[in-house]
Image: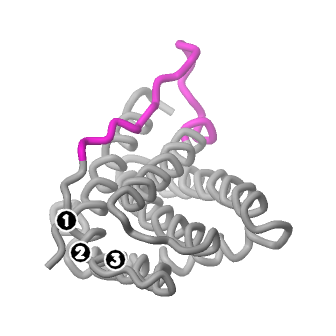
Amino acid sequence: MAIISTRPSVALVKTRWRKNGAPRTLAERAGVIGANVWKIALEIFKHMEKEEFRFGSDRLVTDVMAEFIAFQLQLADRAVYGRLSDADRATLIGEAARHLAATMENNQRDLLGPGEYRKPFIDLLNARFEEYAGFEYPGGEPGFPCLRFFAAKVSDAMAASGNKWVVEQIMDIEAPEMVRLIRKLIDQTVNTAPL
């Protein structure tokens, strides 16, 4: 049996505005959400690498990062539900997705060379949003079936690298950290001042 280490608390969420004063627009808040979702995904990747999970190729790394991002973005969507109007929620999450698509595209071009990366990433986000919508979140937390689904998607993305214990690592260590950080991020970006 593998020993799964516990993760030190990660203080990644950065939401302080450089200029004080006027309330922030939805687009500005979406940019903050997108940037932090990327940072969290990258930190989770680095933590798993440190725990000796092998990612194999740059293609596998971007596939795993895409799954991390999709999970976090749907967590953010659920966290803003009821806090914003449906139109504002759609704008916020849509802008965050566009921000993340541009970031992912830039990174994939750097790692993999020229190609069409934005549309496949957006298609993955749309597919995952539909799939995650079918899960229950008792008490606002993703339940076991949701976490199992997420862990399976990460495991599938890493399949070629032959890692054991990926599902357990995701469900027990990485997903709870993502949930905590996304909750903190949404609390700080959506509840700070009127839109």
Q: Residue 112 sits in which quadrant?
A: bottom right
Q: Position of residue 99 (x, y in %)?
A: 65, 51
Q: Could you tell which of marks 1 and 2 lies nearer the N-terminus?
A: 1
Mark 1 vs 3, N-terminal side: 1
Q: Are marks 2 and 3 in contact (CB under 8 Å)?
A: yes
- Reading the image, the residue beneath label 2 is 168
Kindly check if marks 1 and 2 are in contact, taking CB atoms under 8 A apart as contact. yes
Q: Residue at x 42, y 81 (%)?
A: 153
Describe residue 130's horizontal placement relative to residue 163 as left or right: right
Q: Could you tell me the amino acid type at mark 3? A: Ala
Disc assigned to residue 71: none
Q: Is residue 49 shown in magenta? A: no
- Is-magenta flag for residue 20? yes
Comparing marks 2 and 3, which lies closer to the viewer?
A: 2
Instruction: Give the CA separation, mark 1 to mark 2.
Output: 8 Å
How far, Cα to Cα, is label 2 from label 3? 8 Å
* Residue occupying image coordinates x 42% and y 38%: 190
Within-10-Å neighbours for mark 2: few <14, some 14–19, many 20+ = some
Which part of the image, by quadrant, shows the N terminus? bottom left
Left or right of 107, for residue 83? left
Image position of 159 with respect to 192: above or below: below
Front-most of residues 120 and 78: 120
Q: Secondary structure at mark 1?
A: loop
Q: Which mark is residue 151?
A: 3
Q: Kindly identify which residue carries mark 1.
A: 4
Residue 175 falls left or right of residue 144: right
Q: Residues within 10 Å of mark 1 (few under 14, many from 20)?
A: few
- Which stretch did the figure color magenta? 8-29
